[in-house]
Image (tube, coloured by chain):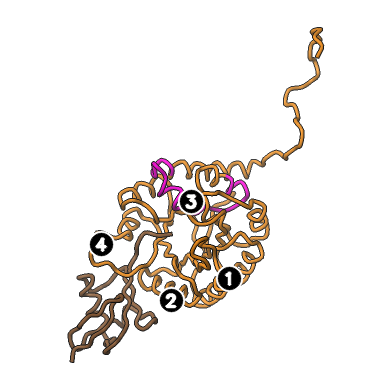
Chain colours: A orange, B brown
Amino acid sequence: MSALEIAGRRLASRLILGSGGFANHEILAQALEAAGAEICTVALRRLDPEARGSVLDVLDRAGVQVLPNTAGCYTARDAIVTAQLAREAFTTDWIKLEVIGDERTLLPDAVELLAAAEALVDEGFVVLPYTTDDPVLARRLQDVGCAAVMPLGSPIGSGMGICNPYNISIIVEQATVPVILDAGVGTASDAALAMELGCDAVLCASAISRAHEPVAMARAIRLAVEAGVLARGAGRIPRRRYAEASTPHEGLPVLGGTA
Amino acid sequence: MSPSVTVNGAQRELPEDATIATVVQELTGRSEGRGVAVALGGEVVPRGEWPRTRLREGAEVEVVAAVQGG
């Protein structure tokens, strides 16, 4: 697999870290290192004058690229203004576009998402949309000029892994931009499966930040992503209904027993 | 007279001739506002325009910064 490239930026790491849910900045810093991440998401909220230190300083010290998101937006209009605020705050054109349609599932609102994506691409943003695992929507997002597509494996923070691997495979097959599995990873094997299915990268927040040992899980998922890439390249054997012996039958001694 | 404006949902009395730069300075203690962005009435105001964007009575200002998320 050649190096990952998003909007002309080459990335050695295929694990993008979400900064949500870490107990404090120190653990986030350690997890960034253990994950080997080169990109990390942040959100925008009303400035808190009492806040001690900024997540931005943590990312700067780690030399990690800031990927702002539009988390919490329910309309294209809100997401577009949030992206514009992020560009102003962080001097980056990159935006992880989230337009949520439902509070309980946090599933994307396809109609608002596509409208926001199109508008932001027109404004020169590098748009990385968080989307459902619908191959048609993924294709529409890629067609309007998104720099990647980020289908969910399962709902945000659910830890249910990849509920529909067939859809993820179809998204990968038709992709002309990188496919980043976003949301749903619960543990390392889910990340390995994403890469075995042909995804280009994995974005992970809760699986790491809410693990009992976040730093250890960051390393586990990093290794799983690497393992998945190698396995994908090596090629899995076909699934069969019945066994196929790996030991030859020929030359088996006759020992007189009867079954 | 000094305008009364809403900053991040809270009423604030500001000095006469207050601009967005005044608000950012008051909230952050700094003027350059790195990592900070401002919307006035739902529209983003570029950093370069902060010092000359006067706040009128009843203005609604949102000042945002990075938090962990996503």
Q: Amino acid at mark 1?
A: Gly
* Image mark for residue A81: 2
The quarter of the rendered structure image containing the C terminus of chain A is top right
* Image mark for residue A15: 3
| Gap between marks 3 and 4 measured at Cα | 28 Å
- Contact? badges 1 and 4 (CB < 8 Å): no
Q: Kindly identify the residue that appears in the image at 42 percent across and 45 percent down.
A: A211
Closest to the observer: A104 or A74? A104
Q: Which chain is home to disc 2?
A: A
Q: Which chain is home to disc 1?
A: A
Magenta span of residues: A193-217
Residue A233 percent coordinates (x, y): 63, 44
Question: Position of A95 compared to A28: left or right?
Answer: right
- Contact? badges 2 and 1 (CB < 8 Å): no
Q: Kindly indicate whether the residues beneath marks 3 and 4 are on one polypeptide chain.
A: yes
| Gap between marks 3 and 2 measured at Cα | 28 Å
Say which label, 3 or 2, has the lower sequence index.
3
**Disc 1 residue crowd, few under 14, some 14–19, many 20+, Cα 10 Å:** some
| Gap between marks 1 and 4 measured at Cα | 37 Å
| Gap between marks 2 and 1 measured at Cα | 19 Å
Q: Amino acid at mark 3?
A: Leu
Q: Amino acid at mark 4?
A: Ala
Q: Amino acid at mark 2?
A: Val
Dot 4: element: loop
Quadrant of res A145:
bottom right
Question: Position of A65 compared to B61: left or right?
Answer: right
Quadrant of res B9:
bottom left
Q: Which chain is home to disc 3?
A: A
Q: Where does label 4 land, which residue?
A: A51
Dot 1: element: loop
